Image (cartoon, coloured by chain):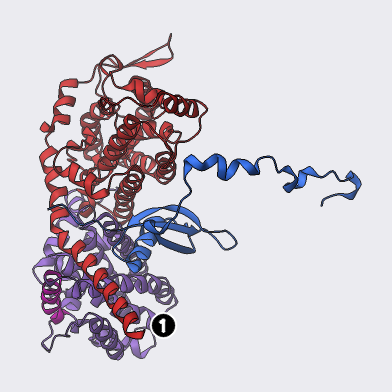
């Protein structure tokens, strides 16, 4: 049980950490200043979330690993984030679609986790829910503008949607860990939030006359540490100082 | 080709209930929703606000500084509008 | 947040200003009254301000890059959050300053173009690279520290929108210098490797930080107008001296050596005496020959060019929505 809870909490922490690392890549490089600041706000929310979750996971584990030990000293195969979140910032459309798919899901997820029997997780969920609601609004409005903007923006966002779609199935998977915790009223039944997620995607896509992809093949593996090649490149710069100079305080 | 201009908006923020909205600054945005979000992301990063107004800068009608005398001088001698113009015996207390 | 005393004076145009208006304007400034956007102002005042404020804004925006260089590599989540928030603040400050300049009749698009074509300058400090993690701390301590010396007097600048932007900026960035210094202190308490990183960063950034105040007064011919107009309140050397006096004792607490063999305290004047910066390097960097000049500009141009389709999409959508609303209204009538 404690082991399951640790595994489960680490998944959520890794999601937040990897997404924040991706979003942080925009800081200083976005299309205009207002958006530069907006994306950084989302990145900061994700870091805040990662810190709370890693700290909690460290306590559950009870081996003295703190948030940084958990974030900076684990290998690719130990990271259990969703594959969607490690996908690169190929262009702004990719970043927005990634954010939109994830925010639409994680808002529903936090709303459900708020009533978890685990008080710490419920508390973190209550805070994260408000942040996710704004991330969803921000990314959804961009989906509409890129979809119904120029020919170029439409073709770019269609490409991003098509590419990232196969990573969305993983969000709703329930494996043994999640199922066991859900039965105890701790974890969220992720499969159960899929219809509401579909509805939210459909509504926003409809505003921009975008089609939901018909592909049904979904990639999986992130929760077991089986990643795309991108994750190693996310971790390499992120962990470099901690790895090069082990055990120091920064 | 010189770039098409993205409209300018003025941002007003109510810092807490009971206060009026105050001018905080400006941002650029293509439309009202984007302007509202940009105002939130730029001007309330440190919990400065509870309510935001955004107004297209072009919609603001301003008085002309060269008409300052005509517009504002005439009120200068109307001291009877101010409470301190009236003397009240001290024993009355606050009024 | 960064400003630099560059060549802010502008060539006087042939046209003479109305002497009466000019006198009234100067009298207003002498009474410490603010000049507001629609007020009459001499063309040279307007031009000087546009140039100074836009350079200041460009410095903020280019200044996001050297520190941004370490965002993905920050060694702890706490440091990563602080650094991201700080770099984001620089972006915000650039935005406030562009807005202040826009009140003088220039658009943000024009200013950005001036930066990208190399017509406008930005602070020379950002043409130096950030080579190890301690640079992030040293930038906060020395570069922001120098900038604060420059900026506090600007809060009283005669031009209202500039002064107001500076007040907001100074308030927001009070954490920047402290986080930098605290980062360095933490490293100094750590391993020998970490202490070496700090010393290395300070060795490289000390002189560039001193040069942020601009050329020595004896070589700076352009401050007279700015002083009279109360855009500038202290000379370059006065501000540089203040900075040195404030910083040397902080270096002692930190336990590092400042790379100036001539640095000593002068009992008589009560000030620190310091050596001569390498002005040739300074002018070279301003001219575009610093190690990072081309890279910085290239990065800015790339972000802007790569983002053009995003800005166009937003404008196109806004136009379509307007048209749809109009069409809806007409149909209803």
Q: Is residue A220 visible?
A: no
Does A128 sit above or below residue A35?
A: below
Q: Is residue B61 visible?
A: yes
Residue A165 is covered by the magenta coloring: yes
Report the predominant secondary structure element of the magenta stretch: helix
Residue range highlighted in magenta? A152-167
Residue C80 is covered by the magenta coloring: no
Task: Please report the residue visible at 21 percent of the width from the left and 68 percent of the height from the top.
Answer: C316
Instruction: Determine which quarter of the picture holds residue A228.
Output: bottom left
Q: Which residue occupies the extreme top position in the image?
A: C268
Task: Please report the residue visible at 10 percent of the width from the left and 31 percent of the height from the top.
Answer: C289
Task: Please report the residue visible at 17 percent of the width from the left and 78 percent of the height from the top.
Answer: A224
**Badge 1: chain ID:** A
Q: Colour of chain A?
A: purple
* Label 1: few (<14), some (14–19) or many (≥20) C-alpha neighbours in 10 Å: many
**Place of residue A84 in the rendered image (x, y in percent of width and height, measured from the top left):** 18, 74
Determine which residue is flagged by label 1.
A116
Secondary structure category for the residue under label 1: loop
**Place of residue B75 in the rendered image (x, y in percent of width and height, measured from the top left):** 65, 44
Instruction: Tell me the quadrant of the picture where the N terminus of chain A can be found.
Output: bottom left
Q: Colour of chain C?
A: red
**Place of residue A169 in the rendered image (x, y in percent of width and height, measured from the top left):** 19, 84
**Chain the render paints blue:** B
**Place of residue C36 in the rendered image (x, y in percent of width and height, measured from the top left):** 44, 40
């Amino acid at each position: 049980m404690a082991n399951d809870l640790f595994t489960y909490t680490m998944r959520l922490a890794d999601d937040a950490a990897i997404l924040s690392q991706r979003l942080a890549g925009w800081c200083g490089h976005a299309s205009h200043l207002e958006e530069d600041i907006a994306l950084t706000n989302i990145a900061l929310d994700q870091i805040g979330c990662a810190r709370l979750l890693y700290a909690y996971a460290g306590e559950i584990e009870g081996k003295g690993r703190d948030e940084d030990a958990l974030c900076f000293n684990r290998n690719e195969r130990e990271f259990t984030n969703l594959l969607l979140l490690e996908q690169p910032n190929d262009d702004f459309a990719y970043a927005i679609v990634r954010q939109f798919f994830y925010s639409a899901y994680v808002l529903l997820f936090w709303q459900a986790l708020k009533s978890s029997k685990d008080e710490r997780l419920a508390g973190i969920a209550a805070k994260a829910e408000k942040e996710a609601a704004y991330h969803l609004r921000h990314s959804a409005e961009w989906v509409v503008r890129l979809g119904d903007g120029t020919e170029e923006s439409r073709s770019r966002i269609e490409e991003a949607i098509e590419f990232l779609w196969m990573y969305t199935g993983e969000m709703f998977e329930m494996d043994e860990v999640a199922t066991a915790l859900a039965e105890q009223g701790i974890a969220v039944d992720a499969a159960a939030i899929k219809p509401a997620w579909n509805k939210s995607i459909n509504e926003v896509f409809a505003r921009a006359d975008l089609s939901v992809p018909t592909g049904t093949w979904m990639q999986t593996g992130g929760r077991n540490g089986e990643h795309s090649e991108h994750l190693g490149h996310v971790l390499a710069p992120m962990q470099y100082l901690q790895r090069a100079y082990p055990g120091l305080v920064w | 080709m010189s770039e098409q201009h993205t409209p300018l908006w003025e941002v007003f923020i109510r810092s807490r209930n009971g206060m009026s909205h105050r001018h905080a600054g400006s941002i650029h945005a293509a439309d009202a929703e984007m302007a509202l979000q940009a105002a939130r992301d730029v001007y309330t990063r440190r919990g400065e606000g509870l309510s935001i107004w955004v107004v297209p800068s072009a919609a603001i009608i301003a008085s002309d500084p060269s008409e300052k005398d005509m517009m504002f001088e005439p009120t200068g001698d109307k001291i009877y509008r101010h409470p301190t113009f009236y003397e009240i015996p001290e024993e009355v207390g606050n009024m | 947040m960064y400003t630099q005393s560059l060549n802010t004076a502008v060539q006087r145009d042939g046209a003479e200003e109305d002497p009466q208006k000019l006198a009234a304007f100067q009298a207003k400034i002498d009474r410490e009254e603010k000049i507001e956007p629609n007020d009459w102002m001499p063309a040279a005042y307007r031009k000087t301000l546009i140039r100074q404020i836009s350079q200041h804004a460009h410095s903020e925006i280019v200044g996001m890059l050297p520190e941004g260089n370490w965002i993905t590599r920050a060694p702890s989540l706490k440091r990563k959050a602080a650094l991201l928030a700080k770099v984001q603040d620089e972006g915000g400050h650039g935005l406030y300053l562009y807005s202040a300049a826009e009140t003088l009749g220039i658009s943000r698009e024009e200013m950005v173009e001036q930066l990208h074509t190399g017509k406008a300058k930005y602070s020379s400090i950002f043409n130096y690279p950030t080579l190890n993690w301690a640079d992030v701390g040293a930038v906060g301590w020395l570069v922001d520290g120098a900038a604060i010396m420059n900026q506090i007097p600007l809060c009283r600048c005669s031009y209202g929108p500039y002064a107001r932007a500076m007040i907001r900026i100074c308030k927001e960035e009070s954490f920047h210098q402290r986080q930098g210094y605290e980062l360095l202190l933490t490293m100094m308490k750590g391993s020998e490797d970490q202490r070496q990183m700090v010393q290395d960063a300070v060795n490289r950034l000390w002189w560039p930080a001193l040069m942020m105040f601009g050329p020595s007064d004896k070589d700076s011919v352009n401050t007279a107008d700015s002083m009279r107009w109360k855009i500038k309140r202290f000379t370059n050397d006065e501000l540089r001296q203040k900075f040195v006096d404030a910083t040397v004792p902080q270096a002692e607490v930190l336990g590092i050596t400042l790379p100036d063999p001539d640095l000593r305290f002068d009992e008589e004047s009560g000030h620190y005496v310091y050596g001569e910066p390498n002005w040739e390097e300074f002018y070279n960097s301003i001219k575009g020959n610093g190690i990072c000049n081309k890279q910085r500009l290239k990065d800015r141009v790339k972000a802007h060019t790569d983002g053009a389709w995003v800005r166009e999409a937003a404008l196109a959508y806004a136009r379509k929505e307007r048209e749809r609303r109009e069409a809806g209204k007409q149909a209803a009538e």
